[in-house]
Image: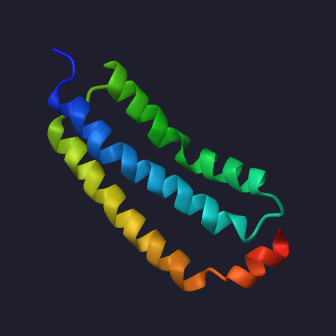
Amino acid sequence: MFPNVSWLLVGVLLDPLIVFLSISLVIAVSQHVKTSKSAQSVAMILILPIIGSLISQASGVLLFGIQFAVLLATVLAVIDVVLFLFIAKRFNREEYILNI
């Protein structure tokens, strides 16, 4: 039956967490590189394995259980919060604007 509980967990919990992580990585890296395109490239390299596993889960090739999906969502939520707090403390708007 489509969609099942595991698929819904991926769509409702994991996808927003991964999007937030990706945007946070782009912001974190953008202060240290020359262009926004290179910041996106670095962030994509870091996030690509997670996106690949989610596509595999959604297509049915790789099936994690509900417990694993909830555990992964919890770990991603903790990473997102820690990364957000780190970026909020270190982000310098003036330096970022000067690099543009």
The colour style of the image is: rainbow
The quadrant where residue 79 appears:
bottom left
Q: Residue at x 28, y 42 (%)?
A: 12
Q: Residue at x 50, y 78 (%)?
A: 86
The quadrant where residue 4 appears:
top left
Residue 39 against residue 64 in the figure, above or below:
below
Of residues 26 and 52, the one nearer the viewer is 26
> Split into 4 quadrants, where in the image is the C terminus?
bottom right
Expressed as whole percent of the image width and height from the top left, the position of residue 63 reads 27, 26
Q: From the viewer's perspective, is 2 left or right of 26?
A: left
Of residues 50 and 24, the one nearer the viewer is 24
Q: From the viewer's perspective, is 50 left or right of 94?
A: left
Of residues 56 and 26, the one nearer the viewer is 26
Expressed as whole percent of the image width and height from the top left, the position of residue 51 reads 47, 38
Expressed as whole percent of the image width and height from the top left, the position of residue 44 reads 61, 46
Expressed as whole percent of the image width and height from the top left, the position of residue 45 reads 62, 45
Q: From the viewer's perspective, is 8 left or right of 20?
A: left
Q: From the viewer's perspective, is 25 left or right of 64?
A: right
Q: Residue at x 33, y 45 (%)?
A: 14
Query: Furthest-top residue in view?
Result: 1
Residue 91 against residue 76 in the figure, above or below:
below
Residue 48 against residue 83 in the figure, above or below:
above
